[in-house]
Amino acid sequence: MFKNIIVRRPAKSICDGITSAPELGKPIYEKAIQQHDDYIAALKKCGCEVKVLEALEEFPDSCFVEDTAVLTPNVAIISRPGAESRRNETEYMIPTIKEFYPEDKIEYIKAPGTMEGGDVMMVGNHFYIGKSDRTNEEGCRQFIEILEKYGHTGSIVTLEEMLHLKTGVNYLENNNLLVSGEFLTKEEFKKYNQYEIPVGEDYAANCIWVNDKVIVPEGYPKVKEMVESMGYEVITVDTSEYRKIDGGLSCLSLRFSSLK
Ligand code: GLY
């Protein structure tokens, strides 16, 4: 269960966020703010306390706080984003992490390692880490070393196509895994109850489990129905403006339970 959530308000500069899909157009700030309000309301409905950080205009992608850290039950790991324009977002996150984790339970990915939290999927005590364009081999190595020091385990999943691991695969607890694209054939995911994302709804592979409810992006009816069929209460939130810059539901928050 998660008690705490950290989010950061989108900046007006969100229209300059990194994107692989310019054909979708630029995010509309006012709409992004409304969707962010709805997202926070959904998280509160899941019983979490939500800490809302102020927007950082100099970082267009900084609302995607998930990439700045991985917050486990035993340790907070501050990332080192692979995207240069995002690298210093972590500096603005560290003081907040210190409100929730004691200093001796905070670790850091160091150069030349790179790592983004979107590449990390937690399954109980085990953490899958995607080796991607954003998370390099050295980042994976440091990450797993830190996990093991704190009683967790980790393993690498090599990405060929997707931006982040959780762009295409998400764990919904109870052995249930939403899977799409290149992850459908990965041996390490065969042991889970795999739910294949229907063609045309790929974006909705990025759903989040929060305390037995599942938040699903609005506008993907087949995925919504599939998640409901697993027995979860579903909350939908429109994330159309974030999708325009490769962002999804998981990217917009850090979900954890404070160690303080
Ligand atoms: N636009 C989100 C990212 O590239 O990290």
Image (tube, rainbow, N blue to C red):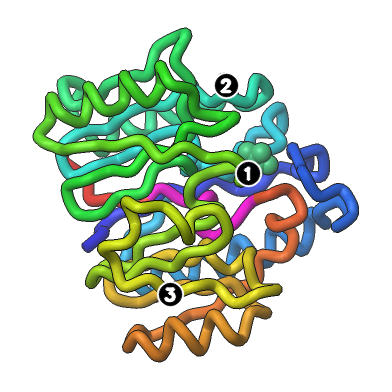
Q: Residue 5's spot in the image, x, y percent?
A: 37, 53
Q: Residue 160's spot in the image, x, y percent?
A: 58, 40
Distance (Cα) linking label 2 and label 3: 34 Å
Q: Is residue 244 left or right of residue 134?
A: right
Identity, as a three-letter code, of the amino acid under mark 3: Tyr
Quadrant holding the C terminus: top left
Ligand 1: image quarter: top right
Residue 82 showing in the rendered view:
yes
The magenta span reads: 247-254
Q: Residue 199's spot in the image, x, y percent?
A: 66, 74
Quick one: 259 or 159, which is closer to the camera? 159
**Residue underneath mark 1:** 161
**Residue at the (9%, 35%) spot, across then down:** 151
| Mark positioned earlier in the residue sequence (1 or 2) | 2
| Mark positioned earlier in the residue sequence (2 or 3) | 2
The number of numbered discs placed on residues in the rendered structure image is 3
Q: Is residue 250 magenta?
A: yes
Circle 3 packing at 10 Å, graded few (<14), some (14-19), many (20+), is some
Element assignment for label 3: strand
Q: Is residue 173 magenta?
A: no
Q: Residue 236's quadrant in the figure?
A: bottom right
| Mark positioned earlier in the residue sequence (1 or 3) | 1
Distance (Cα) linking label 1 and label 3: 20 Å
**Residue underneath mark 3:** 195
Residue 47 showing in the rendered view:
no
Find the residue positioned furthest to the left: 151
Above or below, comparing residue 23 to residue 20 in the picture: below
**Residue underneath mark 2:** 87
Quadrant holding the N terminus: bottom left
**Residue at the (51%, 41%) spot, across then down:** 65
